[in-house]
Amino acid sequence: MKASQLFLLPGLVGFSCANETAHKYSSDACSALAKTFPNNVAYPKTLSYIQANSYWSERQAEVHPRCFVIPKTTKDVSTIMKVLTSLNAPFSVKSGGHTAFAGGSNVADGVTIDLKNLNDITVATDRKTVSVGPGNKWINVSEVLDPMKLAVVAGRVADVGVSGLILGGGISYFSGQKGWACDNVRNFEVVVASGDIVNASPKTNADLYWALRGGGGSNLGIVTRFDLASFEQGDLWTNSLIFPGAMNSTLIPMFQNLTVKGLPTDPAAHTYFVLTHEPTLGGYIALTSFYHATIPSPAKSIPPVFEPFQSVPGAIVNTTLVAKISTHSKLIDVPYGSRQTWWDTTVAASSASFFTDVVALFEARNADLFAAAKGKKITPYLVFQPIPINVLSEMQKNGGNALGLKPSDGPLMIVQLSTSWEDAELDEAIENSSHELIAKVKSMAKKRHLENGYVYMNYAGSTQDVQKSYGNESYRKLKKIAEKWDAEKKLKNLWKGYFKL
């Protein structure tokens, strides 16, 4: 060994010892859990392990825990929490497994708790509350509620898990009327760091209730039941338009105007704008998806708030559909099997030219990426997700949420960058280019006095500092609450992967 390399030895030895220690703690935890739950612990190379290690993003599926433990009840989760924290075993928690980045809800050589068997869905006799287990995906919920003509403020994509979406905020078809999913939880049942089972509502453990509304679970506890406010709802109306990317100069100012002036006048309306590169359709295409909670008459007509888009010429697709919520959620589902990354930031929605310039940055980034990929498949998406004034107002109910957003901040727009690809050799290039593009968007927003800085947890990249983006007041409050419920910092140190305070 060269003399210049000797300085590395202490660090390498320390790293090796730390790894061996974590490995021992995980092995001890898996053995202890297997004795307590002999039929609910899965080890590598078994069918139950292979099934549990199925994730939407291939990058997550490439992470291999020492074992999976699959609880059936809240009491099981309590026991698991006590075993893991007493043995200092690193762990992670999987609900739907829809995080894009590696290790988001999985942990290498640790213990992953798979909540898939906590999948009850119970409708109260008064039809005003639906209790949902964290092992459900939103398709499970809508398929139960659709025949009853009921709905909850839920995720829009069929395969997304209940828990991650709610704890990170939760954009919904019904956000214009009711806020985000986290704003419509009546009560959380939570296993906290001590293993105790507690409830959190506006009147019971109100601090924990506030923090779980957007603050994420990994700093606070494992939610084992969500009691969600439900409401009468039949079919959902939608209109989808696809245009050649050349129409962006017309579409983007119209979409910006819709966000600022249109959506607040019609809370039943919901929308987003997607730009992607699809070679089979000639290159860039723009997709505008419009949803309405009230069916117009006749059903194939267009609600006034969306009518201006019908006059834009050159649509490749113009489809109107009235269908069950479950049907809509399946239509926008993204299949398993690809590598994924998400990044986002939030800006004031007051400048159409800003969003046009974001598109130019996106296309320039993609040109470099396509050249580097040398023909390997990459599918990039740029998504504009509005947060109009009416949504921000709904977020303030029941004591407000942890996101730090106020009506006076709005209207806002989430700028979401997503990329899907197949070849692991492109991981670094895609992650770096994603980070760089979001940094450029933030810099441009700051120069134009449009910066808000909020990072939506459910679209965030692994290195984005999500909770700090909520603002100093909310961040300090979250830290204080986390320290109260996790006084020994067990969750802080042992729960790996998702966004930490």
Image (spheres, grey):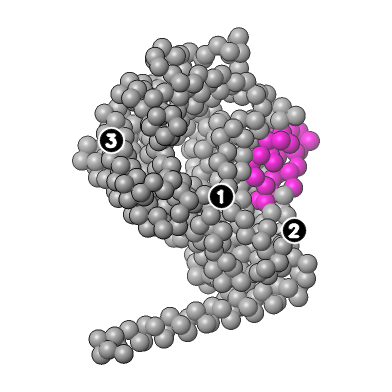
Circle 2 sits on which residue? 73
Foreground tag (3 vs 2): 3
Location of the N terminus (image quadrant): bottom left
Q: Which secondary structure, mark 1?
A: loop
Q: Position of residue 9 (x, y in %)?
A: 35, 87
Q: Which secondary structure, mark 3?
A: helix
In the figure, 22 relative to 334: above or below? below
In the figure, 443 relative to 495: above or below? above
Q: Separation of disc 3 and disc 1 at Cα?
A: 29 Å
Q: Is residue 449 visible?
A: yes
In the figure, 231 relative to 67: above or below? above
Amino acid of disc 1:
Gly
Q: Position of residue 183 (x, y in %)?
A: 55, 40
Circle 3 sits on which residue? 360
Amino acid of disc 2:
Thr
Q: Quadrant of residue 13?
A: bottom left
Residue 337, which numbered label? 1
Q: Which residues are magenta?
A: 120-145
Q: Position of residue 379 (x, y in %)?
A: 43, 42
Depth check: give the residue in front, 419 or 446.
Answer: 419
Foreground tag (1 vs 2): 1
